[in-house]
Image (cartoon, grey):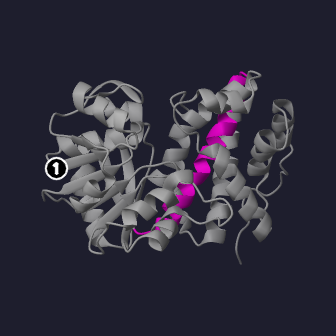
């Protein structure tokens, strides 16, 4: 799906991930605008050509336009790329919807589920905007590594060929390999769920446990991802790719992962509230564990790792109990074969 078309790209959200995607798009030669929620951040990005708060040490292209005017970004773009925390997505989508035109394409890179409704991000976007040509970007994408030009890949999932083609044109380069698919549900579930497992992986790391323990966690976590995905209507093959095992391994193995950091610090005796207050960016696994647990209870799904993490974060559980619960997951036949 090679494409050399020149695009007008609008990236909404100037955290580390949004800034990285805007940088790549601008370096690809596309007319790229980056929206920052805070006016002072937009000014700093324009003047310093560096996101000191979220991506220090990475120079931004002179061609990248930065603004605090969301309506301008939406009006001027053919391809919108939404990169905001999941808890803020509905509000931002509503603002985007005030200016959006139905023919525009939108790719979101937000990983989470909405509490209360258990809706995926693309479902919220369809509710709050007139946009229908929607896709999701998900994969093993630690922003700091990618911003330095270190190699990785990602998935753009959409039912619309135009979305996949434009996403590939905007972002695929020599070190960022963009694959495509049509399973939006699977990509969104994988991207959201892996943050819960990454938090648990951080706990294991903070306890000084080794690779055997991590491998056990990731393998069983992938099984729970598939359980949730099946209930939501995902194609299970998606979880064997970039948005599933790829994202899961990267996020659950690196201290650059915010969710991994939270788990590590909890294992060392710190409390959740001060950790969150100190972090500049959102660890999505904290809120996603609430939404997934709500959904699991409503559908009577058995997700032992999610339950253990939820108890640690939100029900006064402690780290030793979490480890005990992980090791108490029933054994027996590893896979249930369908007849």
Asked where in the image residue 24 lies, by quadrant, the reply is top left
Q: Front-most of 185 and 73?
A: 73
Is residue 313 rendered magenta in the image?
Answer: no
Q: Position of residue 52 (x, y in %)?
A: 36, 25
In the image: residue 313, left or right of residue 156: right
In the image, taking residue 255 as reference, residue 213 lies left or right, namely right
Residue drawn at (37%, 62%) of the image: 96
Q: Position of residue 164 (x, y in %)?
A: 30, 64
Residue interval drawn in magenta: 182-209
Q: Which residue is mark 1?
A: 30
Q: Residue at x 83, y 55 (%)?
A: 332
Residue 57 in which image quadrant: top left
User: Is 40 left or right of 72, judged from the image as shown?
Assistant: right
Quarter of the N terminus within the rendering: bottom left
Most foreground residue, 268 or 183: 268
Q: Residue at x 23, y 54 (%)?
A: 9
Q: Residues within 10 Å of mark 1 (few under 14, many from 20)?
A: many
Q: Position of residue 267 (x, y in %)?
A: 74, 26
- Is 316 rendered above or below residue 221? above
């Amino acid at each position: 799906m090679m494409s050399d078309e020149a695009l007008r790209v609008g990236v909404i959200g100037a955290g580390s991930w949004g800034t990285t995607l805007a940088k790549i798009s601008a370096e690809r030669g596309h007319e790229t605008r980056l929206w920052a929620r805070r006016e002072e951040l937009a000014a700093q990005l324009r003047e310093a050509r560096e996101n000191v708060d979220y991506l220090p040490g990475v120079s931004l292209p002179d061609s990248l336009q930065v603004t605090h005017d969301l309506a301008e970004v939406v009006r001027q773009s053919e391809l919108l790329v939404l990169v905001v925390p999941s808890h803020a997505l509905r509000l931002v989508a509503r603002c985007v919807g005030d200016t959006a035109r139905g023919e525009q394409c939108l790719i979101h890179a937000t990983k989470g589920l909405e509490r209360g409704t258990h809706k995926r991000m693309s479902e919220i976007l369809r509710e709050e905007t007139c946009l229908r040509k929607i896709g999701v970007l998900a994969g093993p994408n630690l922003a700091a590594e990618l911003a330095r030009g270190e190699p990785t890949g990602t998935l753009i999932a959409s039912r619309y060929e135009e979305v996949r083609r434009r996403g590939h044109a905007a972002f695929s380069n020599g070190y960022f390999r963009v694959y495509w698919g049509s399973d939006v549900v699977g990509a969104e579930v994988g991207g959201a769920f892996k943050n819960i497992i990454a938090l648990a992986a951080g706990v294991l790391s903070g306890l000084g446990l080794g690779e055997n323990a991590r491998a056990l966690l990731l393998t069983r976590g992938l099984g729970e991802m598939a359980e949730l995905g099946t209930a939501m209507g995902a194609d299970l093959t998606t979880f064997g790719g970039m948005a599933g095992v790829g994202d899961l391994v990267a996020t659950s193995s690196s201290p650059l992962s915010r969710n991994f950091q939270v788990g590590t610090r909890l294992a060392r005796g710190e409390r959740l509230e001060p950790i969150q207050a100190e972090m500049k960016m959102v660890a999505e696994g904290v809120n996603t564990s609430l939404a997934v647990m709500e959904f699991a209870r409503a559908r009577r799904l058995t997700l032992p790792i999610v339950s253990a993490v939820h108890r640690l974060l939100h029900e006064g559980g402690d780290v030793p109990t979490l480890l005990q619960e992980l090791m108490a997951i029933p054994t027996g036949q590893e896979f249930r074969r369908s007849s």
